[in-house]
Image (cartoon, grey):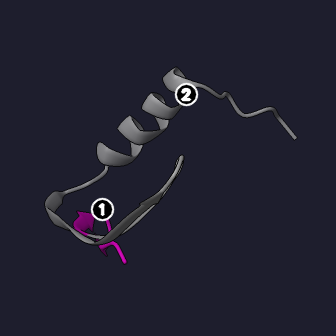
Amino acid sequence: MPVQPTGRDAQHAHLSGFFSTLKAFNGATLHAAATNGDRSLSESTFDMIGPDGPIL
């Protein structure tokens, strides 16, 4: 199995490739967020239209 690139540049390339396929980004909703010391979490939903329709 080939080794996947890692780091900031690889993440940027991956996300740029994904976002370039979107036909529309209609918004995002933050439903919940919490922190505890050095840990955090969030729950969000995104309203996006991909090349084959809505992304669930």
- The structure residue drawn at horizontal position 72% and vertical position 34%, both measured from the top left corner, is 4
Residue 49: x, y in percent?
Answer: 23, 67
N-term-proximal mark, 2 vs 1: 2
- Number of residues whose C-alpha sits closer than 10 Å to that of mark 1, classed few (under 14), some (14–19) or many (20 or more): few
Instruction: Determine which of the numbered discs, if any, sits on residue 30 in the image.
Output: none
Furthest residue in direction front, as rendered = 37
In this view, the residue in front, 46 or 49, is: 46
Question: Residue beneath label 1, please?
Answer: 51
Furthest residue in direction right, as rendered = 1
- Location of the C terminus by quadrant is bottom left
Label the magenta part by its dominant secondary structure: strand
In this view, the residue in front, 12 or 22, is: 12
Q: Amino acid at mark 1?
A: Pro
Magenta range: 46-56
Q: Amino acid at mark 2?
A: Ala
- How many labels were placed on the picture? 2
Residue 46: x, y in percent?
Answer: 26, 68
Instruction: Determine which of the numbered discs, if any, sits on residue 10 in the image.
Output: 2
In this view, the residue in front, 33 or 4, is: 33
Secondary structure of residue under mark 1: loop
